Image (spheres, rainbow, N blue to C red):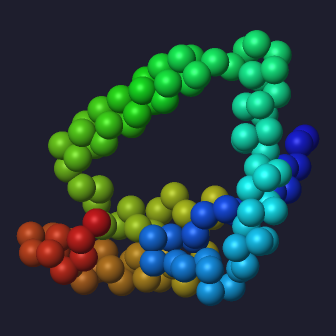
Amino acid sequence: MIEAVTYRLGPHSSSDDPSRYRSKEEVESWAARDPIERLRRYLEVKGIWTKAWDDALRKELEDLVSETIRRIEKAPPPPLESLFQDVYAEMPAHLREQLEAFMESGERRRPEISDKFPL
């Protein structure tokens, strides 16, 4: 087992401003120890990493992500009841009750539900 303890350099989300609670010096200090950048430098010294290989790999992965997004965007939205499923190995009683109430309400059969609850 490998436990990788590191520092989140970026914000939690696009609405987060980490400069409110972290100094520039703190972020710069951790950026200098960024494990991904350290591994890249190590691989470069060993002759394993090259800029051309990195560029090709990034393009390949960006193309894969873009194609996956295009494919998924064409798929129908998941059923609303899936909001309750696949979250816990065993669904807690309070969520099971909410799911049952939702299923009995008839809300999932209404076509305008997607406007009320966009997924």
- Where's residue 108, x and y in %? 22, 72
- Where's residue 86, x and y in %? 51, 58
Quadrant in the picture for the N terminus: top right
103 left or right, relative to 41: left
Label total for image? 0
Name which quarter of the figure residue 87 lies in: bottom right
Is any part of residue 75 visible from this angle? no
Q: Which residue is at the front of the view, 35 or 104?
A: 35
Q: Residue at x 48, y 29 (%)?
A: 58
Name which quarter of the figure residue 107 lies in: bottom left
Q: Residue at x 73, y 31 (%)?
A: 40
95 left or right, relative to 101: right
Name which quarter of the figure residue 63 lies in: top left
Seen in the picture, residue 10 relative to 64 is either above or below; the reply is below
Q: Residue at x 77, y 31 (%)?
A: 41
62 left or right, relative to 78: right
Q: Residue furthest top?
A: 47
Quadrant in the picture for the C terminus: bottom left
Q: Which residue is at the front of the view, 50 or 118?
A: 50
Q: Residue at x 25, y 83 (%)?
A: 105
- Where's residue 51, x and y in %? 58, 22
Q: Which residue is at the front of the view, 110 or 7?
A: 7
Seen in the picture, residue 74 relative to 90 is either above or below; the reply is above
Is any part of residue 22 visible from this angle? yes
